[in-house]
Image: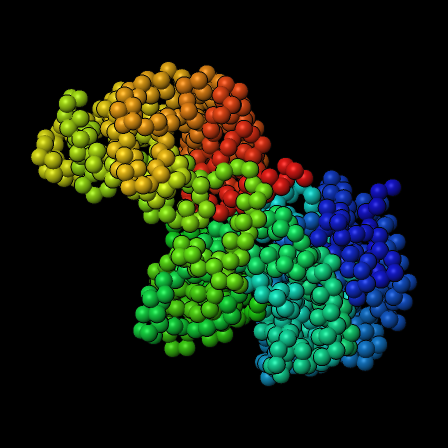
């Protein structure tokens, strides 16, 4: 018989912490806490297999699961000497989801389950606290009705607000017992009105209704969207943890909170979190009340109000972090002065915090340097390199009185955009290409799509552990919460800051590092990490110092080299500062669009004979020489791979009548002649047309000019003591003969310069990949252009597939966007075959990947299994690639 239910308690625990795939993250955490002696309310977990059986049975509970749950429930009643549905000492339960991968707030939770007209009276009697009993009952009715019965949350909130107003209560905890008793009856009336049925009184019906609701919530829109953006597989399903209730709302000696073992924003050590007296968990997480700090000198801090539970919490958190060897996110309740832990999981954190925590844990002896490399998400480094507000620009607008308000700095970073007051509006405007700041009273799981689309998030209510703060940190979004100075008015679609009123669509800026909300748009500047790396600032304890230590550990284990795609000396210098070991792709066509150059490029294209074309190219030669010289100087001692002109010529000509007329005047030539030339160059499918090496073969003088510029630049650089190492790359070959023709046309120029300059080729057509063994005979190196190779292999246009590719990914035709993550089964096999064939022909053949996949961690994990020697990516992706290549090396040795 398959075990579908696992019990957990101080004395008896069936599961373990390494059983996340079976028990979900929550259930595994509860089991492990019980094993190490942490105070946890007992209960049981329905496994993910139980969920899958339910789905396979057509959303029906099978008898085996029902039987095992009933047996576990009997055990729990005996263990606690309480009666589920009884009127002596009633057993109340919580029912929570628990996916194998943490999905905070995305699925459903039910608290205080088991209350009805009889058990609420029993709870009032046994606790001698009717107010607490009916507060728990109204919470249960509201939560169960919303989650299981589908009654709108706002219906209950409206009645709750009316009750507060009637009693002049500022917060829910001030409502009297009589007021709550009346509120419970009004809640029941709402349920009857909306469902046509009375609120269920049978605790067993409540339990199974809740379990099935949690099962179904795995497929709710917000959970599916969260899995989609975080690439979490949907096949595993969710576990369900059923746990005996402990009550933080049972009086002023009780409370509830959420804490982290370290600061999730910056990674600094020490307990960090918030709590509320006389409250239940959703009050903290949902931002319904602004909570208080756990530690501190403030009179309302938990350290001052509940000193003994606070001391126990500190000790318990230290035990948990030491045991799990990572920063923990913990939910706890204090019931009449006794501490209970309801959950522990690896905490979501910002990129900054992730880096610091991993390095600090290594220094503290909890993990080794390889584990540090494994733990830091390579993509998170992109967030550390993201822009910040320009200091001077921000200073000027603040001096002009643009500061609107301050809130809690929940997610660092700078964001500027249009105010969107709903998730739907945020998604709509983002799809139109606008930067958006999502502004809400407080966010809820239903806002997940809008949060994902937004550049930043601002909420009126909530604390540092609220839904907005936790989710934004996980997404790497700038976020400010608990900004009580603002009033969100959804009726008028306005945002009020004291006397200032802004409308939806107006621009604001938020600084998630300082908590400042600022009117208007502010320009940005490179991040402090980039500035520190460029300027060499690595003071101990600085972000730069942590970054350098991580990269040093990565360099010790990685096997793949990392170069950068760069076309300017500025990009080259940045790439070098970020650790690039050369330039793997210099796109020379980008240089042709500069001032004074495009004129001669167009002269060259409009030339009626080779003589005129050479004259125009002669004017371009000094520009190209200077370009290459500056790159070689910037990369002194490192290789610079220069790709010869690749795009079709029509891209350099104007396409509208107005621009054609302007060009004719500028060049003092016939307007009709330009139009004829534009028509002549027009191609139905230019990406597969007259471009790349085909252009160099039909117009050899173009490539000859470029190679001459490389030689001249190398001469100048070498004369100045620069160790210049250019490499020449021929694009878009399909045959060995094409490479040979181009190589022969420039060989004399290279020889006359007196240098040995490697001439290699891009492998970006299937034929070139399939004949790589032959091509390698004439190539000094290979570089896979995986962007075009993907287009050619899959028959997909990178520019035109956007209309249907998202549907393909949603339907599972492709697991991921093949232009972002390499298609291993198709494109990947071509790459692997060609790289090995090249090495078989020429063992010392240098092989790189210079498409966008060179900066994608998942693609790098595959590339590391091939004969490729290095990857090349945009400068800001270089640290990502360095860390990803190290992780690939560690994985291959595991």
Identify the residue at image location x=33%, y=48%: 570
In the figure, is residue 825 to the left or right of 534? right
Q: Is residue 752 above or below residue 327?
A: above
In the figure, is residue 278 to the left or right of 776? right
Identify the residue at image location x=79%, y=72%: 120
Residue 347 percent across, percent down from the top left = 63, 58
Residue 145 percent across, percent down from the top left = 68, 62
The part of the image, by quadrant, that contains residue 155 is: bottom right
Q: Which colour scheme is used?
A: rainbow
Q: In this view, does 507 lie above or below 770?
A: below
Report the quarter where the N terminus lies: top right
Report the quarter where the C terminus lies: top right
Q: In this view, does 236 lie above or below 477?
A: above
Identify the residue at image location x=79%, y=66%: 39
Residue 750 percent across, percent down from the top left = 29, 25
Pick whichever, 271 or 253, lies toward us: 271
The part of the image, by quadrant, that contains residue 399 is: bottom left
Residue 870 percent across, percent down from the top left = 49, 35
Pick whichever, 859 or 777, lies toward us: 777
Identify the residue at image location x=47%, y=59%: 538
């Amino acid at each position: 018989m398959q075990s579908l239910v696992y019990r957990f308690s101080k004395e008896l625990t069936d599961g373990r912490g390494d059983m996340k795939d079976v028990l979900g993250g929550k259930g595994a955490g509860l089991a492990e806490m019980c094993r190490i002696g942490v105070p946890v309310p007992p209960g049981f977990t329905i496994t993910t297999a139980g969920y899958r059986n339910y789905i396979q049975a057509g959303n029906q509970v099978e008898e085996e699961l029902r039987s095992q749950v009933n047996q576990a429930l009997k055990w729990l009643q005996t263990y606690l000497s309480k009666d589920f549905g009884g009127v002596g000492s009633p057993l109340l339960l919580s029912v929570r989801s628990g996916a194998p991968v943490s999905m905070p707030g995305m699925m459903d939770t039910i608290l205080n389950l088991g209350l009805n007209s009889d058990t609420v009276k029993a709870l009032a009697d046994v606790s001698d606290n009717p107010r607490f009993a009916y507060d728990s009952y109204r919470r249960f009715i509201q939560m169960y009705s919303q989650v299981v019965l589908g009654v709108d949350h706002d219906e209950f909130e409206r009645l709750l607000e009316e009750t507060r107003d009637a009693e002049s209560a500022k917060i829910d905890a001030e409502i009297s017992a009589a007021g709550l008793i009346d509120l419970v009856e009004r809640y029941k009336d709402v349920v009857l009105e909306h469902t046509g049925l009375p609120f269920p009184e049978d605790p067993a019906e409540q339990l199974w209704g809740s379990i099935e609701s949690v099962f179904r919530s795995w497929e709710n829109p917000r959970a599916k969207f969260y899995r989609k953006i975080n690439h979490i597989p949907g096949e595993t399903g969710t576990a369900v943890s059923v746990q005996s209730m402990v009550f933080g709302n049972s009086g002023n000696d009780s409370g509830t909170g959420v804490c982290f073992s370290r600061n999730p924003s910056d990674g600094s050590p020490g307990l960090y979190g918030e709590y509320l007296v006389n409250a239940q968990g959703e009050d903290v997480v949902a931002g319904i009340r602004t909570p208080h700090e756990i530690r501190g000198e403030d009179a309302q801090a938990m350290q001052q109000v509940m000193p003994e539970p606070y001391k126990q919490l500190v000790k318990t958190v230290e035990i948990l972090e030491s045991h799990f060897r990572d920063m923990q996110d913990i939910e706890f309740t204090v019931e009449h002065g006794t501490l209970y832990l309801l959950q522990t999981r690896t905490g979501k954190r910002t990129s900054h915090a992730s880096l610091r925590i991993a390095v600090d844990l290594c220094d503290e002896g909890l993990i080794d340097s390889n584990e540090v490399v494994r733990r830091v998400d390579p993509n998170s480094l992109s967030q550390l390199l993201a822009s910040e507000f320009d200091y001077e620009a921000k200073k000027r607008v603040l001096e002009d009185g643009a500061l609107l308000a301050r809130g809690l700095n929940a997610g660092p970073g700078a964001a500027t955009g249009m105010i969107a007051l709903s998730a739907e509006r945020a998604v709509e405007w983002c799809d139109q290409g606008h930067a958006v700041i999502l502004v809400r009273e407080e966010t809820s799981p239903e806002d997940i799509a809008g949060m994902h689309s937004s550049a930043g998030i601002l909420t009126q209510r909530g604390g540092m552990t609220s839904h907005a703060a936790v989710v934004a940190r996980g997404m790497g979004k700038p976020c400010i919460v608990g900004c009580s100075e603002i009033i969100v008015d959804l009726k008028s679609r306005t945002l009020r800051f004291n006397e200032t009123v802004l409308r939806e669509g107006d621009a604001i800026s938020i600084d998630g590092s300082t908590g400042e909300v600022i009117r208007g748009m502010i320009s940005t500047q490179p991040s402090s990490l980039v500035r520190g790396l460029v300027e060499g600032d690595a003071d101990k304890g600085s972000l730069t110092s942590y970054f350098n230590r991580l990269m040093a550990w990565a360099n010790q284990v990685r096997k793949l080299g990392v170069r950068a795609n760069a076309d300017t000396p500025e990009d080259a210098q940045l790439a070098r500062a970020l650790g690039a070991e050369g330039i793997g792709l210099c796109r020379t066509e980008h240089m042709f669009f500069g001032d004074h150059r495009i004129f001669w490029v167009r002269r060259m294209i409009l030339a009626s004979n080779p003589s005129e074309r050479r004259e125009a190219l002669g004017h371009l030669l000094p520009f190209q020489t200077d370009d290459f010289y500056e790159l070689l100087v910037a990369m002194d001692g490192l290789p610079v791979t220069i790709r010869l002109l690749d795009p079709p010529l029509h891209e350099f000509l104007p396409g509208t009548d107005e621009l054609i007329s302007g060009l004719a005047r500028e060049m003092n030539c016939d307007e009709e002649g330009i139009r004829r030339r534009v028509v002549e160059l027009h191609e139905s499918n230019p990406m597969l047309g007259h471009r790349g090496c085909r252009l160099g073969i039909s117009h050899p003088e173009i490539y000859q000019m470029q190679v001459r510029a490389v030689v001249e630049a190398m001469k100048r650089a070498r004369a100045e003591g620069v160790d210049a190492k250019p490499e020449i790359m021929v694009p878009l070959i399909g045959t060995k003969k094409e490479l040979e023709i181009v190589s022969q046309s420039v060989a004399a120029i290279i020889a006359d310069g007196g240098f040995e300059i490697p001439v290699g080729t891009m492998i970006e057509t299937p034929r070139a990949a399939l004949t790589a063994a032959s091509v390698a005979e004439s190539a000094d190196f290979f570089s896979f252009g995986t962007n075009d190779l993907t287009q050619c292999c899959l028959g997909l246009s990178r520019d035109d597939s956007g209309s249907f590719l998202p549907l393909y990914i949603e339907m599972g035709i492709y697991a991921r966007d093949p232009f972002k993550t390499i298609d291993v089964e198709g494109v990947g096999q071509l790459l692997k075959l060609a790289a090995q064939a090249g090495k078989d022909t020429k063992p010392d053949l240098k092989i790189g990947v210079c498409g966008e996949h060179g900066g994608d961690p998942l693609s790098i994990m595959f590339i590391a299994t091939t004969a490729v020697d290095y990857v090349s990516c945009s400068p800001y992706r270089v640290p990502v690639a360095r860390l990803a290549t190290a992780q690939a090396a560690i994985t291959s040795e595991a």
